[in-house]
Image: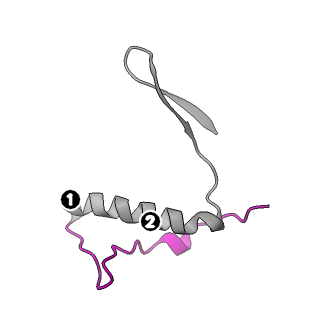
């Protein structure tokens, strides 16, 4: 799926493509979720664990696809 995002005035701000998550990309997704958790921590008060990670607990529950 590919979408164009329009801002006020009808200008295209960026193009966004949503792809299925692949098992091979799981480390990248884990790192991106760490950044999200860091950003949310100012609102939810969460802190890092003993390894310095927020450690998003639900990533292993995601249905990820294998590449062909």
- Image check: 39 left or right of 29? left
- Image check: 66 left or right of 62? right
Q: Which residues are magenta?
A: 45-68
Q: Residue 45, located in which quarter of the rendered image? A: bottom left
Q: Circle 2 sits in a helix, a strand or a loop, which is it?
A: helix
Mark 1: few/some/many CA within 10 Å (<14, 14-19, 20+): few
- Residue farthest to the bottom, as pictured: 50
Q: CA distance from mark 2 to mark 1?
A: 20 Å
Q: Which residue is mark 1?
A: 43
- Whether residues under marks 2 and 1 lie with C-beta atoms below 8 angstroms apart, the answer is no
Q: Can you tell which mark lies on residue 31?
A: 2
- Image check: 28 left or right of 36? right
Label 2 vs 1, first from the N-terminus: 2
The percent coordinates of residue 24 (x first, y second) are 64, 67
Q: Quadrant of the N terminus?
A: top right
The percent coordinates of residue 60 (x first, y second) are 54, 74
The percent coordinates of residue 47 (x first, y second) are 23, 73
- Image check: 7 left or right of 28? left
Main SS of residues in magenta: loop
Q: Residue 31, located in which quarter of the rendered image? A: bottom left
């Amino acid at each position: 799926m590919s979408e164009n995002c329009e801002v006020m005035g009808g200008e295209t701000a960026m193009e966004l493509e949503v792809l299925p998550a692949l098992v091979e990309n799981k480390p990248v997704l884990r790192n991106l979720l760490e950044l999200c958790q860091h950003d949310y921590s100012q609102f939810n008060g969460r802190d890092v664990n003993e390894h310095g990670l927020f450690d998003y607990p639900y990533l292993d529950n995601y249905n990820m696809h294998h590449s062909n």
